[in-house]
């Protein structure tokens, strides 16, 4: 059995930390500075990771490649199975004209103001999609919609990535919180409530924050009532549901109420007209149709999204995902590594769930196809377009999560965590960056909680700090890493004209990710040292 070294480089904490972080640093430089496509950047990070894991941490080569293969298989099922199914649903909506009908419904029922569209779609609607799908697909679908309304592709993707932070901790019907509770042994409802309180200020802040970036302070003064309604209704519902009802429905209900409240508010309050942000006439018209194309009422544009929300909630309530689920103990890796930090063997179990969330979304796509009467030709066109959009994202995500698993099993990730946990009184400030690192690597707040949840609790006990607060901080800090995750960005660019420009997107979002994570750290410091 391989025992992970925590400080492998001459008992030097700083040097060990730098070498452990080198795959992440290389990936960030290749993407954000040299502007290489995401698959090249993550391949470079994986190569450096293999060199470090085998050459410095001493992980046997067979274990190294077994951990990478385990991560790559996990990346396909469930991660990309969910993303590809959601992209397929999107393409069914496109082929049947329902996506354009949804665009026309939005145009008809909202003020002719791109700033308002950005808040309603980029924040409220994207959050609703995050609640059922996640893994970058809300970013892809919402940015495609904004582009159809006249937003430049880079702007649309950047702003939606920033918006797609507050909803992440309760995405997928609260799976990140469920995993955090199972890993730490802390009460799930208490964790859910604490996370909601940490994220509530950011849910209120982010609509204002993005509006400053997009249109400046003048627009904030003009639009502050609708920004407050969108962010405030989301935050209030999130805290209420997570604290008094159930955290699993927190994101679905908060995003739905935020979307409904904002649209209804805009029926009684309208911002002052500003021609600079009016949607161009060419984007206001119905998309041109060919003979035989559907051209019905705009309300039918809601059909795909209502179907997927209802199906996924029912799927979860009936525990359909558990049918046929089989734990696969990964050959040559399961319990072959000893985690020094936790003093226990490292399990390597791939949960094969043929009826998981990805299948629920696929069923939603098929039901949408039936409900909209799609032709066989257009159905096959949706399949082909999805494959074309998704193949490079599959490769990139496989490389990214392969690197994440390699760093986990070699001990590199635990070295990072060990060094951060050794910061003493500074730990409340830097603890959120543990979650940030994990979500950057895996693209998943769930995986970030599984990775560092226990470490946060152990460090909190050693420092006589609140373990619930820091387990929650891991999740809340992690959501800020979502906007720079190669997985999230790659899936997001899949339906835009930005393929191969993931580095440009990363460069636009990176500083905001760091800034918002730092703010979260300051909030945790305040909670620990002032409120406790």
Image (cartoon, helix red, strand yellow):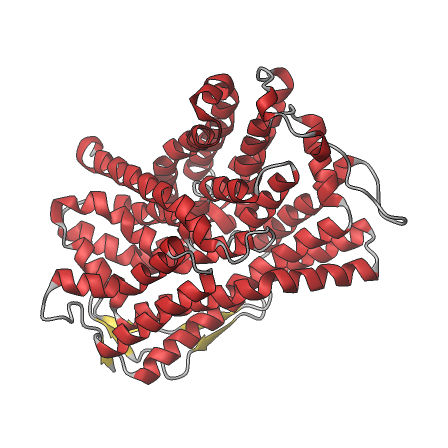
Q: Could you tell me if residue 185 is visible in this image?
A: no
Q: How far from the left and from the top, in percent, is residue 165?
A: 43, 43
Q: Report which quarter residue 247 is drawn in.
A: top left
Asked whether, in this view, residue 265 is left or right of residue 101, the answer is: left
Q: Nearer the viewer, residue 350 or 299?
A: 299
In the rendered view, tell whether residue 440 sits above or below residue 144: below
Q: Nearer the viewer, residue 303 or 113?
A: 113
The residue shown at (77%, 60%) is 379
Q: Report which quarter residue 409 is drawn in.
A: bottom left
In the rendered view, tell whether residue 175 sits above or below residue 112: below
Asked whether, in this view, residue 138 is left or right of residue 363, the answer is: left
Q: Nearer the viewer, residue 92 or 472?
A: 92
Q: Residue furthest left?
A: 11
Q: How far from the left and from the top, in percent, is residue 362?
A: 66, 59
Image quadrant where one finds the C terminus: top left
Q: Report which quarter residue 466 is drawn in.
A: top left
The residue shown at (36%, 61%) is 27
The residue shown at (83%, 52%) is 373
Q: How far from the left and from the top, in percent, is residue 121?
A: 58, 36
Q: Residue furthest right?
A: 291
Q: Could you tell me if residue 502 is visible in this image?
A: yes
Q: Residue furthest front?
A: 34
In the rendered view, tell whether residue 254 sits above or below residue 15: above
Image quadrant where one finds the N terminus: bottom left
Q: How far from the left and from the top, in percent, is residue 44?
A: 37, 68
Asked whether, in this view, residue 447 is left or right of residue 427, the answer is: right
Number of numbered discs on residues: 0
């Amino acid at each position: 059995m391989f025992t992970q070294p925590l400080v492998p480089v001459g008992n030097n904490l700083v040097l060990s930390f730098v070498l452990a972080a080198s795959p992440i640093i290389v990936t960030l430089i290749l993407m954000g500075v040299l502007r290489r496509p995401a698959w090249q950047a993550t391949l470079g990070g994986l190569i450096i990771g293999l060199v470090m894991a085998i050459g410095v941490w001493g992980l046997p080569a067979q274990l190294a490649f077994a951990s990478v293969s385990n991560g790559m298989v996990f990346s396909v099922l469930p991660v990309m199975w969910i993303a590809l199914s959601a992209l397929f649903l999107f393409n069914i909506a496109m082929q049947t004209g329902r996506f354009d009908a949804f665009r026309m419904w939005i145009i008809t029922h909202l003020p002719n103001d791109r700033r308002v569209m950005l808040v309603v779609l980029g924040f409220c609607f994207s959050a609703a999609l995050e609640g059922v799908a996640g893994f970058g697909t809300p970013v892809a679908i919402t940015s495609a919609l904004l582009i159809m309304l006249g937003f430049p592709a880079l702007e649309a993707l950047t702003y939606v990535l920033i918006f797609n932070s507050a909803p992440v901790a309760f995405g997928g019907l609260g799976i990140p919180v469920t995993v955090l509770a199972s890993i730490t042994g802390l009460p799930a409802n208490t964790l859910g409530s604490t996370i909601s309180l940490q994220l509530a200020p950011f849910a209120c802040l982010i609509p204002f924050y993005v509006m400053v970036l997009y249109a400046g302070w003048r627009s904030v003064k003009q639009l502050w009532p609708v920004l407050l309604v969108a962010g405030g209704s989301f935050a209030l519902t999130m805290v209420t549901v997570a604290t008094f009802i159930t955290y699993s429905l927190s994101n679905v209900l908060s995003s739905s109420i935020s979307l409904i409240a904002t649209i209804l508010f805009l029926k009684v309050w309208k911002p002052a007209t500003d021609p600079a942000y009016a949607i161009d006439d060419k984007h206001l018209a119905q998309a041109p149709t060919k003979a035989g194309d559907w051209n019905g009422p705009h309300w039918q544009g809601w059909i795909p999204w209502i179907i997927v929300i209802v199906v996924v909630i029912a799927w979860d309530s009936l525990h359909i995902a558990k049918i046929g689920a089989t734990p696969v103990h990964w050959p040559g890796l399961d319990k072959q590594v000893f985690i020094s930090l936790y003093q226990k063997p490292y399990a390597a179990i791939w949960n094969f769930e043929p009826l998981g969330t990805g299948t629920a979304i696929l069923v939603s796509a098929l039901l949408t196809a039936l409900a909209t009467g799609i032709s066989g030709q257009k159905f096959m066109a949706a399949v082909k377009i999805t494959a074309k959009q998704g193949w490079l994202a599959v490769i990139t995500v496989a490389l990214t999560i392969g690197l994440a698993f390699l760093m986990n099993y070699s001990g590199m990730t635990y070295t990072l965590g060990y060094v951060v946990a050794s910061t003493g009184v500074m730990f409340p400030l830097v603890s959120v960056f543990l979650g940030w690192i994990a979500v950057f690597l895996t693209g998943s707040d769930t995986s970030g909680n599984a990775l560092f949840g226990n470490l946060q609790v152990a460090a909190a006990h050693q420092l006589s700090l609140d373990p619930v607060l820091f387990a929650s901080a891991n999740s809340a800090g992690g959501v800020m890493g979502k906007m720079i995750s190669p997985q999230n960005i790659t899936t997001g660019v899949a339906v835009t004209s930005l393929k191969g420009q993931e580095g440009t997107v990363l460069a636009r979002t990176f500083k905001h990710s760091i800034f918002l994570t730092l703010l979260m750290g300051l909030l945790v410091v305040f909670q620990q040292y002032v409120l406790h």
